[in-house]
Image (cartoon, rainbow, N blue to C red):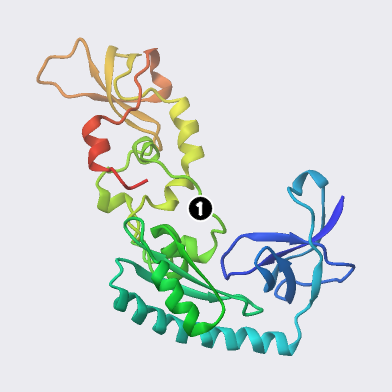
Amino acid sequence: MAEVIGVRFKEVGKVYYFDPLNNKLRIGDKVIVETARGLECGEVAMANKEISDDELNHPLKPLVRIATPDDIRRVEENREKEKTAYKICEEKIAKHKLEMKLVNVEYTFDNNKIIFYFTADGRVDFRALVKDLASVFRTRIELRQIGVRDEAKMLGGLGICGRPFCCSCFMGEFQPVSIKMAKEQGLSLSPTKISGTCGRLMCCLKYEQEAYTDLIRHTPKVGAIVNTPEGRGLVVENNLIARTLKVKLDNAPADVGPKTFKVRQCKLIKDGYIKLDKKELEKLNGLE
């Protein structure tokens, strides 16, 4: 067992474990720790806790110190420097006529490096831009290309539900989301209805997927052949939440529509399957 604290470096970011060195810390405390980027100021997101050695995937780095007023002041000064650096970088991008969009600028705590986050449709040759920025700031420069999901997480905003983005509120890491999830949940496959502001599939499709997977396992799918109290038929629609099936009976006249039965009233003979056809995949290309 090892005693650790969880430290977060961004408002809604991944939590990293550090050795507290016998210090008792509370959630919200500011601390200085050693990271791969050098010294960083983070916020305690998890107070002292003992975890098993199996949960540690790398050697624990120790806490350097609890942040002092001078440390907090330096962080605030860095935030102001970032605003200035953002404006300068935008001017340099325009000067070099690069097809890229600057998203955010981040100073490391010790000012040894400035990281510029940007989005672009493809690869960008920014070597001349890096030299130009280095001559202005006289420190190490890193340009990091990010995806549209990361951009949404950094900038924040409101989703189509009217609430702030999940990724910028509480999601530490992105979870994989697939078009198949939308299909299995019976949602409209219109890109405008299943994609978020970032233009990718909505992260919230993941939230109820386990429940839908369980319901699908115990519910005949569209295309299944079942026996009903009124005879054999083909499932043309199912309602997973209400646990009902619409069945086109084999013995019903052609002008009679399907009948609704409870799932428990039907016995499965041959199940159907959920698939995405080629046209649907082409229509939704690029959303995942």
Q: Against 221, is 288 above or below?
A: below
- Residue appearing at x 39%, y 20% in the figure: 265
Question: 44 or 103: which is nearer to us?
Answer: 103
* Image x and y of residue 98, in percent: 31, 69
* Image x and y of residue 21, in percent: 87, 67
Q: Against 273, is 50 above or below?
A: below
Q: Is residue 163 visible?
A: no
Q: Is residue 243 left or right of residue 25?
A: left
Q: Against 193, is 169 above or below?
A: below
Q: Against 73, is 55 above or below?
A: above
Q: Residues within 10 Å of mark 1 (few under 14, many from 20)?
A: few
Quadrant where the image shows the C terminus: top left
Q: Which residue is mark 1?
A: 174
* Helix, strand or loop status at disc 1: loop
Furthest residue toward left: 255
Question: 234 or 15: which is nearer to us?
Answer: 15
- Residue appearing at x 45%, y 61% in the figure: 150
- Residue appearing at x 67%, y 63% in the figure: 36
- Locate residue 4: give its quadrant: bottom right
- Locate residue 247: give its quadrant: top left
Total number of numbered discs in the rendering:
1
- Residue appearing at x 41%, y 84% in the figure: 88
- Locate residue 284: give its quadrant: top left
* Image x and y of residue 225, in percent: 32, 14
